[in-house]
Image (spheres, rainbow, N blue to C red):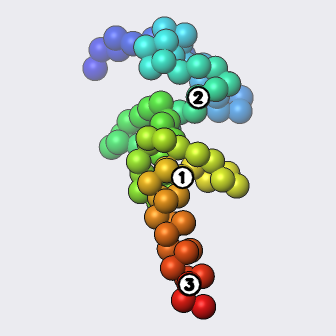
């Protein structure tokens, strides 16, 4: 198999530097963004992490509560459920 990418070594604690060109292509900002690391067969795959709702995986209109990302639709549904429970007491 012929290697066509950039070759990087692994340091003593297992880190690999991702080339700046690749980070630019993924629009990954240092210290602001995260990467998802997964396995696909015998490959390690890196993807830019896009935070999504804890409940429904929607990534639109996110707010954060106690470290959890929640979309506005789920917040409205939770408000409705809590309201129904309070009325039923």
Q: Residue at x 55, y 75 (%)?
A: 83
Nearest to the eye among marks 2 and 1: give it: 1
Badge 3 marks a residue whose secondary structure is helix
Residue 7 visible (yes or no): no
Q: Disc 3 marks which residue?
A: 87
Badge 2 marks a residue whose secondary structure is loop
Percent across and percent down for residue 19 are 53, 12
Q: Disc 1 marks which residue?
A: 70
Q: Earlier in the sequence, mark 2 or mark 3?
A: 2
Q: Disc 2 marks which residue?
A: 33
Work out whether residue 62 or residue 43 is closer to the camera in this orientation and state it.
62
Q: Is residue 70 left or right of residue 60?
A: right
Q: Residue at x 43, y 14 (%)?
A: 25
Q: Residue furthest bottom?
A: 89
Q: Earlier in the sequence, mark 3 or mark 1?
A: 1
Work out whether residue 69 or residue 6 is closer to the camera in this orientation and state it.
69
Percent across and percent down for residue 43 are 38, 36
Work out whether residue 47 or residue 82 is closer to the camera in this orientation and state it.
82
Asked if the residue at tag 3 contacts the one at tag 2, i.e. Cβ–Cβ closer than 8 Å, the answer is: no
Inter-mark Cα distance, 2 to 1: 18 Å
Nearest to the eye among marks 3 and 1: give it: 3
Where is 17 relative to 33, above or below?
A: above
């Amino acid at each position: 198999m012929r290697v066509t990418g950039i070759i990087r070594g692994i340091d003593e604690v297992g880190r690999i530097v991702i080339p700046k060109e690749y980070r630019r292509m993924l629009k990954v900002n240092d210290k602001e963004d995260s990467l998802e690391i997964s396995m696909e067969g015998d490959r390690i795959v890196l993807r830019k992490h896009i935070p999504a709702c804890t409940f429904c995986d929607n990534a639109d209109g996110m707010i954060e509560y106690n470290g959890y990302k929640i979309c506005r639709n789920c917040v409205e549904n939770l408000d409705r459920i809590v309201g129904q429970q309070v009325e039923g007491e």
